[in-house]
Image (cartoon, rainbow, N blue to C red):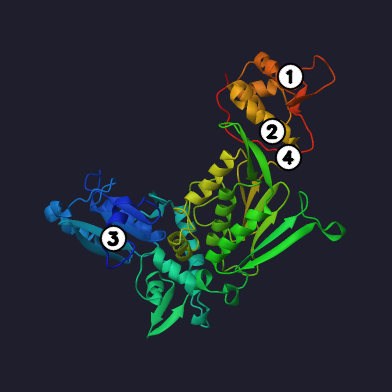
């Protein structure tokens, strides 16, 4: 099942056809679907051609069942010629006919075009593939697409002075294995449109240098990442200069991702949080890795490398991480829809990074950042666009990290956890998560009657001495409750609130 069944793309095996999730580059169409006319398939191919290219398989159901297109009889030829009948201008789509267990399947190989925009001949409708769906474009979106097509040309430009000795051969061997390719490396790079071959001479493209050169900076200035750590909450200059670490990373994109991942893992502080499901304190970094790693990968994948002079910046403050890269948001993507829309500014680079396993099914990256921050009970990611650059801010809960809890108190909470009911657990969780709070605030947020909340708060203050009441008045509705502070381990509790009882 892992032997290639396609002569055009070595990644396509029987297992791939049947199990690969539909994404930016892959679509299945089965015979049982509604409106599976040739024109419908043409719409899908137009969307792929206007985006990043891809593969459309006709004759395989969503469940992976291999069907037989020969059952279409005389209508089959209409699908063979749909590219010529419905798509303008002429596009590069190869139709490969595959026989699997005596059943006929069509594989449409769609090559991306960096310059032209395609549309339906009969109704002049334009489409663009976004993740696993096909979108019809309006006039404004078409204009944005035209603009971004011009920027995309940069990664396809030739580097006339590129030295083949500068190729990172171990990384290229890894790439060959990932895409299940057994031939010559240069042939693979040609198939992936990362080099050109003319008159037996190899011409290396800028995308190839960024991905597989040992030193991309030699050819493309500022193809680097800079990490700056500031002490405090803002950048200061002069006598108040507060930069405490400044590191520049220079390498090809895959190795940059690996190096930055290792560096940031040891750069972030660790804190304790209370896991409500098991009643144990666990160590977590100040920022969730899935969020910041996706952000770094997205910046490397989608920056405007034609804007030279600006590296990607990772600015680390006490309360936040700011990641910025050059170039405006691409095509139909805006700050408001960035969670669901996508358009690869550097599609050759994006495709190679996905092949290597660094990029998720492409629009999942931003959505994953949002999901991870939410699961970590942190504020939403903040995207903005200023002065031709895109900025992302990830905030932590540093304001809560001044809470301390003695190790003996941690141990006491863990030992008693199985004795606490849901309401008691949620009270502790809320205070560990959000800091000092009044009884009414806690009652409102965990949805438990205020009298019940007060009863348990008094228990935690007077009997167990887990919490402290911050008021000298005996009857004070605005009295706040917090962790019984002592010199010890920083705590930062994060978890989902369970239903109170």
Badge 1 or badge 2: first in the primary sequence:
2
Q: CA distance from mark 1 to mark 4?
A: 22 Å
Residue 215 placement: quadrant: bottom right
Q: Report helix, strand or loop for mark 3.
A: strand
Kindly report the distance in space between the C-alpha atoms of the residues bearing marks 3 and 4. Answer: 59 Å
Query: Residue placed at 27% from the left, 61% from the top?
Result: 83
- Please give the residue where the numbered disc 3 appears in the rendered image: 108
**Residue occupied by mark 1:** 463
Across and down, in percent, residue 34 comes to 25, 43
Crowding around mark 2 (Cα neighbors within 10 Å: few <14, some 14 to 19, many 20+) is some
Q: Which numbered disc flags the more N-terminal residue, 3 or 2?
A: 3
Q: Residue at x 41, y 63 (%)?
A: 178
Whether 65 is drawn above or below 100: the answer is above
Spatial CA distance of label 2 from label 4 is 9 Å
Say left or right for 101 vs 127.
Answer: left
**Nearest the camera: 127 or 227?**
227
Look at the numbered discs 1 and 2 and tell me whether their residues touch, using CB distance below 8 Å: no
Q: Decide: marks 2, 4 in contact (CB < 8 A)?
A: yes
| Residue 244 image offset from top left, x and y in percent | 77, 58
């Amino acid at each position: 099942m892992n032997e290639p069944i396609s002569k055009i793309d070595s990644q396509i095996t029987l297992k791939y056809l049947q199990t690969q999730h539909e994404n930016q580059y892959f679509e299945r169409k089965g015979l049982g679907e509604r409106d599976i006319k040739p024109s419908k398939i043409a719409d899908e191919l137009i969307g792929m051609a206007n985006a990043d290219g891809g593969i459309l398989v006709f004759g395989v159901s969503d469940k992976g069942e291999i069907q037989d297109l020969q059952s279409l009889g005389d209508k089959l030829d209409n699908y063979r010629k749909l590219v010529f009948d419905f798509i303008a201008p002429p596009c590069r789509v190869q139709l490969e006919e595959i026989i699997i267990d005596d059943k006929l399947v069509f594989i449409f190989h769609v090559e991306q075009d960096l310059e032209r925009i395609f549309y339906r001949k009969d109704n002049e409708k334009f489409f663009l593939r976004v993740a696993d769906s096909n979108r019809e474009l309006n006039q404004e979106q078409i204009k944005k697409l035209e603009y971004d097509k011009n920027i995309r040309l940069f990664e396809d430009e030739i580097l006339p002075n590129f030295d083949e000795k500068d190729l990172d051969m171990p990384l290229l061997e890894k790439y060959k294995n990932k895409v299940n390719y057994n031939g010559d490396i240069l042939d693979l790079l040609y198939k992936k449109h990362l080099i050109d071959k003319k008159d037996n001479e190899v011409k290396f493209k800028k995308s190839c240098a960024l991905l597989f050169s040992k030193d991309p900076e030699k050819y493309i200035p500022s193809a680097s990442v800079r990490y700056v750590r500031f002490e405090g909450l803002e950048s200061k200059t002069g006598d108040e200069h507060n930069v405490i670490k400044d590191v520049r990373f220079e390498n090809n994109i895959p190795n940059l991702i690996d190096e930055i991942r290792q560096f940031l893992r040891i750069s972030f502080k660790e804190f304790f949080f209370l896991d409500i499901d098991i009643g144990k304190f666990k160590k977590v970094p100040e920022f969730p890795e899935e969020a910041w790693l996706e952000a770094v990968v997205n910046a490397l994948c989608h920056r405007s490398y034609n804007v030279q002079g600006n590296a990607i910046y990772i600015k680390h403050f006490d309360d936040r991480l700011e990641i910025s890269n050059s170039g405006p948001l691409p095509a139909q993507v805006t700050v408001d829809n960035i969670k669901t829309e996508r358009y690869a500014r550097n599609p050759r680079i994006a495709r190679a990074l996905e092949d290597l396993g660094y990029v998720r099914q492409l629009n999942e990256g931003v959505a994953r950042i949002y999901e991870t921050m939410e699961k970590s009970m942190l504020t939403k990611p903040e995207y903005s666009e200023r002065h031709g650059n895109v900025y992302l801010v990830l905030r932590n809960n540093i304001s809560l990290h001044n809470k301390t809890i003695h190790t003996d108190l941690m141990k006491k909470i863990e030992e008693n956890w199985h004795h606490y009911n849901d309401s008691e657990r949620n009270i502790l969780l809320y205070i560990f998560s959000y800091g000092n709070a009044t009884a009414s605030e806690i009652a409102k947020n965990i949805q438990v009657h205020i009298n019940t909340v007060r009863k348990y708060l008094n228990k935690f203050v007077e009997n167990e001495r887990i919490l402290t009441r911050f008021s000298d008045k005996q009857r004070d509705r605005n009295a706040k409750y917090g962790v019984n502070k002592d010199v010890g381990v920083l705590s930062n509790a994060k978890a989902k609130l369970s239903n109170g009882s």
